[in-house]
Image: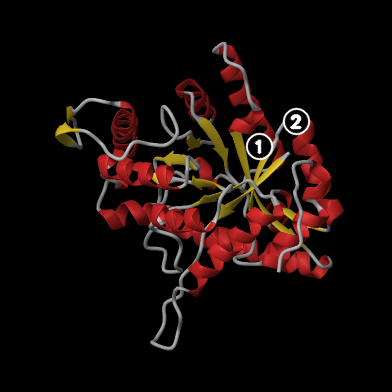
Amino acid sequence: MKFGLFGSAQAQRGGPDLDSGQGFRDFIDYNVEAEALGYASTFVVEHHFTGFGQVSATLNLLTYLAARTSTLRLGTAVMVLPWHNPVLLAEAAATVDLLSDGRLEFGVGKGYRHNEFSGFCIPIAEADARFEESLGLIVKSWTSAERFSHHGRFWNFENVIVEPPTRQKPHPPIWMAAGNPDSIRSVARRGAKLLLDQFASIPLIIERFNIYKAEVESLGRRFDAQDVGVARAFYVAKDAADKRQAVETRLAGQRRMTELATAPGAMKSSMLSFDYTLDAAEESALYGTPDEIGKKLDALCAAGIEYVLLNGPAGSVENLRRFASEVMVGFGEARVVEVG
């Protein structure tokens, strides 16, 4: 089993005596240590207008992280294509891939948070069409050796050739987040890799994993389990009370996210289709003692899942180290070293 990271830095608002960038610098140090401990990748979110300082300029952050690391795969989870000029985004992503010597993992999505579409004054009803047009343009930008023009519903470009070239050929791996069965099958048909969210229960994650696997194999392609990244919150608890507090904090965070994401009276995205209970919040997370966490990982392993992306308390190096030395070491591909 391979382990990577998933999550976000946070910047604090405040007066002149507050270092608003410390959370971002802590995030960089956290990822540098993760590389030394044997974690394989980091996937960073993109969010806007939260009020609690989540990462917005994802590729900027990954560019800095690329300079501080040498083996860590650098993922976006996800770049929300409806909000971006696709040619400018293709250029920025290619720059990260080139400077990192081909370590970019390009996760893309349509978006699901009401407050973000509202803030950008983009109708959420246009998300699918904007996504499709933008993704096609990004791939064409990366693979076309000749100048091209494009005149579409949302974007127009005349006689352009996108630079720099990507380091990976024909382009960086493309990942897509999906939860609905038809959406999962669509990801497989596109030849993209699949990101599964951190809130779905383990049985539901296994069901979604199997839908993707079956669709890939039905297309006559060889299925690689490491083409599916399963996000899970993680926390190596000191005791039962410590675990309980962590679960309560997680549930409060889920409620805060839902308030931002859901428009009044609107149907919830599959990203938000989870139970708002302490039991559900605990079941879907890797919280507890090393043995408790190990049993949940055993269930994922038994289903054929091989790639887990861990979202832990912001900047908790102790948690990162404990997972590496007390959990990850038992699941292969761990390279635990003493740091600092």
What residue is shown at x 48% (from left), y 56% (from top)?
67
Eye-nearest disc, 1 or 2: 2
What residue is shown at x 77% (from left), y 35% (from top)?
301
**Spatial distance from mark 1 to mark 2, Cα to Cα?**
10 Å
* Type of amino acid at the residue the image marks with label 1: Ile
Image coordinates of residue 311 in percent, x first then y, are 62, 55
Q: Is residue 46 left or right of residue 284?
A: left
Observer-nearest residue: 112 or 317? 317
Residue under circle 2? 303
* Residue at the extreme bottom: 17
Residue 264 visible in the displayed image: no
For the C terminus, the quadrant is bottom right
Which type of secondary structure does the marked residue at label 1 adopt? helix
Establish if 147 lies above or below 77: above
Total of numbered circles in the picture?
2
What residue is shown at x 39% (from left), y 56% (from top)?
60
Establish if 116 lies above or below 238: above
Image coordinates of residue 149 in percent, x first then y, are 16, 28
Residue 169, by quadrant, is top left
Residue under circle 1? 205
Marks 1 and 2 in Cβ contact (< 8 Å): no
Establish if 102 lies above or below 337: above
Which type of secondary structure does the marked residue at label 2 adopt? loop
For the N terminus, the quadrant is top right
Q: Is residue 48 left or right of residue 294?
A: left
Residue 131, by quadrant, is top left
What residue is shown at x 44% (from left), y 76% (from top)?
20
Residue 250, by quadrant, is bottom right
